[in-house]
Image (spheres, helix red, strand yellow):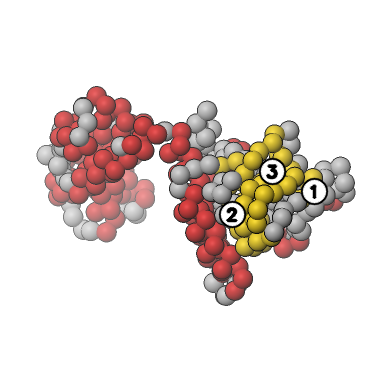
Amino acid sequence: MNSTSKRNPNMLIQFSPNVRRAWNHRVPKMLLKPRIIFDYELLYVEKGELSIRIEEDFYTILPGDIVLFKPGKEHEIMGSVGECWMPHIHFDLMYYEDFEDVPINFKTLKECSESELRLIRQDILDTALPIPDIIRISNHIEIYNTILKLIHAYDRKDPGFVILQKSLLLHIVYHLEKGLHAKMNTHLTLHQKALEQVVTHIVDHYDETIPLDVLAKIACLSVYHFSRLFKEKYSLSPHQFQIRHRIEKAKELMSYSHLSLTSIAEKVGYGSLYAFSKAFKQVEGVSPRQFIRTFLGG
């Protein structure tokens, strides 16, 4: 199953992460007895080899692999080979008032008290952005570099850390999603650059009606193949994408200029106010004049 197939965009918008611990852990050997944790832990294996159990599943973890330990899931590190370098972070994805009071746990579920069990966070990622326990993706270096930046910031904790740690952690989640999506959609990754060139062309020429065959030619693909890939990538047909971007530019002009609706229609490539109004209502659900009255106070 595609890792993003169950995505809940509304949950993603609510993310307000906080980093509890951040370490650049380096040890000659690694063992960790069975336990659960209350939050998330993201571990990147930079060097060495780990034998890990997560509930009923066993894994051999190699350099470049990423492990995501999730709230309430029992796990252990059963052994290691070679010196182990493992930068890792503990974090919450949502804001909790008791954030500072939650410890790093080393007990099993059965060993935890009732008060400790209440500290177990909801696995937000299970519904917001399904991510597996073991992550093997081609862009793992991007995640590794961001973890190191986060550890560096955590060690110093200057006055802006509360902002920086949120942005870096969201950056990590973004790269995880990006890497997993690429892994599950290699056909899209193959044509990623071509599709981005097409989008750039649409954005730069938003005031023009660009025929489908011209866009396909920019991507060096057949019209059929291009149309299918574009819609799979952006969830809109090329034509729908052009219209949506035109309407966004029109909304910008309506908000920050004193141009008439007729002039705005011309600037975003519509030959008449009627055609513009019809397209605008299809996208926004209201006419341009209703939009101005309702949202801009006009």
Q: Nearer the viewer, mark 2 or mark 1?
A: 2
Amino acid found under the numbered disc labelled 1:
Lys
The tag on residue 194 is none
Q: Residue at x 73, y 33 (%)?
A: 56
Q: Between disc 1 and disc 3, whose residue precedes? A: 1
Q: Nearer the viewer, mark 1 or mark 3?
A: 3
Identify the image quadrant of residue 51.
Answer: top right
Quick check: marks 2 and 3 in contact, CB under 8 Å? no
The residue carrying mark 2 is: 47
**Of the pair 261 and 236, the residue shown nearer to us:** 236
Query: Would residue 57 be visible to someone looking at this image?
Result: yes
Q: Residue furthest front?
A: 82
Amino acid found under the numbered disc labelled 2:
Lys
Decide if residue 42 is on the left or right side of residue 13: right
The residue carrying mark 3 is: 51
List x then y, in percent, for residue 87.
61, 58
Which secondary structure lies at badge 1? strand
List x then y, in percent, for residue 180.
49, 40
Decide if residue 137 is on the left or right side of residue 215: right
The residue carrying mark 1 is: 33
Q: Residues within 10 Å of mark 3 (few under 14, many from 20)?
A: some
Query: Would residue 9 be visible to someone looking at this image?
Result: no
User: Cα distance, mark 2 to mark 3?
Assistant: 13 Å
Q: Is residue 65 above or below residue 285?
A: below
Which secondary structure lies at badge 3? strand
User: Cα distance, mark 1 to mark 3?
Assistant: 12 Å
Amino acid found under the numbered disc labelled 3:
Ser
User: Cα distance, mark 2 to mark 1?
Assistant: 21 Å
Quick check: marks 2 and 1 in contact, CB under 8 Å? no
List x then y, in percent, for residue 224.
24, 24
Decide if residue 201 is on the left or right side of residue 147: left
